[in-house]
Image (spheres, grey):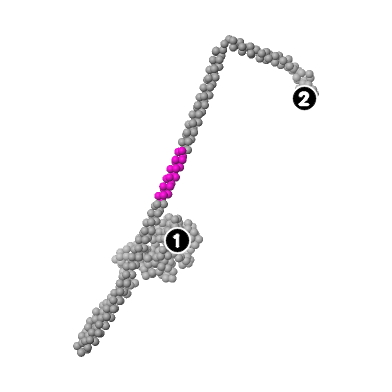
């Protein structure tokens, strides 16, 4: 229930607002401790307090791609869908820069093309510093105008694919947007007015000089005045040229700095991608080696079992063969002994067996004499049951 979108929320770009965040990142946000503890039960009013506590921005970081609190609050805004006036107040807030960036990021995800250009372009004049957490967990320094430029010109920011917006010149051609007015336009107009007035002043000064010269003024004094006037004019022109040069240098330096930053960002991304690819390759190789060793061990056990069964069958077969052979040899010897016995040996055997037969006859005779009468035996049993002595 805590992860469901507000039933009163409207669909954005034909889908659930939370679906603007990829499923993997969405599931990581739902499992995050900050989301469960700090974002539970937040409303549009209480969300401002959590946004004021932010001290950095970013997408995900670390090996398990843990989402930042900034990304959790963006997800919460997509879930409760605050009103447009509240989001605009976030953007116009000048006291808390992370609140302003949070509102700008949410408007970039959910706003129309005209609203995106109308409310985000004025933030180009905000040059305050921001802390940004990178994918490796380290922090880097950035500025508000750089984040706004990334939102307006890039397709990916803070590990979220941004919806596509139309080009500004297309909106200007259809009349949806007025032409962009730069914050330095007033300075440029003042410079142009000053450059237009200077030729008129020079022409007037030349006329006055001509009249005074022909009125009998001293040529030396006039030359000194002209020299001083020229020196002042040259000094002003040199000052303007130096100021233009400094402005161009600052602009070029800022662009070069941005290029270096983009190049470092691309290099870090490529390095992280190569590191992930190497880690996957090593893991795959370890899995293959482990499966190969396991198969080899299984084959060795099966081979030992087959050898053991084979040796056991051979041993039992040899034992049965030796037993049958011994049996056959014994029967053969007995048969040969019976068939090959001499008459003398047979007579000797009969002489040896005769005392046995006599002894058996004697025992039978004694046994027959010792048998008692059945009647006496019956009386003895009765006497034994009565506890009397048996009859003799």
The reply to whether discs 2 and 1 touch (Cβ–Cβ < 8 Å) is no
Image coords of residue 349 (percent x, y) = 61, 13
Prevailing SS of the magenta stretch: helix
- Per the rendered image, the range of residues in magenta is 280-300
Q: Position of residue 304 (x, y in %)?
A: 48, 36
> Upstream in the sequence, badge 2 or badge 1?
1
Kindly give the residue lying farthest to the bottom in the view shown: 216
Instruction: List the single residue furthest toward the left.
Output: 214
Relative side of 115 to 297, left or right: left
Say if residue 296 shows up in the picture.
yes
Given residues 267 and 144, the one toward you in this image is 267
| Residue placed most toward the observer, 332 or 377 | 332
On whether residue 173 falls in the magenta region, the answer is no
* Residue indicated by mark 2: 385
Point out residue 376 in the picture as x, y percentages from the top left corner: 76, 18
Q: Residue at x 44, y 69 (%)?
A: 96
Q: Which residue is mark 1?
A: 68
In the rendered image, which quarter is residue 110 located in? bottom left
User: Residue 41, how many percent across, how many down?
Assistant: 49, 62
Gap between marks 2 and 1 measured at Cα: 105 Å
Element assignment for label 2? helix
Q: Residue at x 39, y 56 (%)?
A: 272
- The structure residue drawn at horizontal position 44% and vertical position 64%, both measured from the top left corner, is 56
């Amino acid at each position: 229930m805590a992860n469901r979108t507000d039933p009163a929320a409207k669909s954005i770009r034909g889908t659930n607002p939370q679906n603007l965040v990829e499923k993997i990142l969405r599931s990581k946000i739902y499992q995050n401790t900050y989301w469960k503890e700090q974002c539970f039960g937040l409303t549009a009013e209480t969300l401002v307090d959590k946004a004021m506590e932010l001290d950095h921005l970013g997408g995900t970081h670390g090996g398990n791609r843990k989402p930042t609190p900034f990304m959790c609050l963006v997800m919460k805004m997509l879930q409760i869908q605050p009103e447009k006036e509240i989001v605009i107040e976030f953007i116009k807030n000048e006291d808390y820069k992370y609140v302003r960036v949070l509102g700008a990021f949410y408007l970039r995800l959910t706003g129309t093309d005209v609203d995106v250009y109308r409310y985000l372009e004025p933030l180009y004049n905000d040059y305050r510093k921001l802390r940004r957490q990178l994918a490796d967990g380290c922090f880097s320094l950035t500025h508000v105008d750089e984040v706004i430029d990334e939102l307006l010109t890039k397709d990916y920011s803070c590990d979220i694919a941004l919806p596509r917006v139309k080009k500004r010149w297309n909106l200007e051609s259809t009349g949806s947007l007025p032409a962009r007015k730069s914050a330095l336009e007033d300075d440029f107009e003042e410079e142009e007015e000053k450059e237009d007035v200077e030729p008129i002043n020079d022409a007037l000064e030349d006329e006055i000089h001509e009249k005074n010269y022909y009125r009998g003024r001293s040529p030396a004094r006039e030359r000194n005045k002209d020299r001083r006037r020229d020196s002042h004019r040259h000094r002003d022109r040199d000052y303007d040229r130096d100021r233009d040069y400094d402005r161009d240098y600052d602009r070029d330096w800022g662009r070069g700095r941005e290029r270096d930053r983009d190049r470092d960002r691309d290099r870090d991304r490529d390095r992280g991608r190569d590191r992930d690819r190497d880690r996957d390759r090593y893991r795959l190789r370890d899995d293959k080696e482990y499966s190969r060793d396991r198969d080899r061990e299984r084959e060795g056990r099966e081979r030992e079992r087959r050898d053991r069964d084979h040796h056991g069958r051979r041993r039992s077969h040899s034992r049965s063969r030796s037993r049958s052979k011994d049996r056959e040899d014994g029967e053969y010897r007995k048969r040969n002994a019976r068939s090959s016995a001499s008459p003398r040996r047979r007579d000797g055997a009969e002489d040896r067996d005769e005392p046995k037969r006599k002894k058996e006859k004697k025992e039978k005779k004694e046994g027959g004499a010792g048998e008692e009468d059945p009647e006496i035996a019956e009386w003895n049993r009765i006497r034994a049951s009565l506890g009397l002595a048996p009859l003799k």
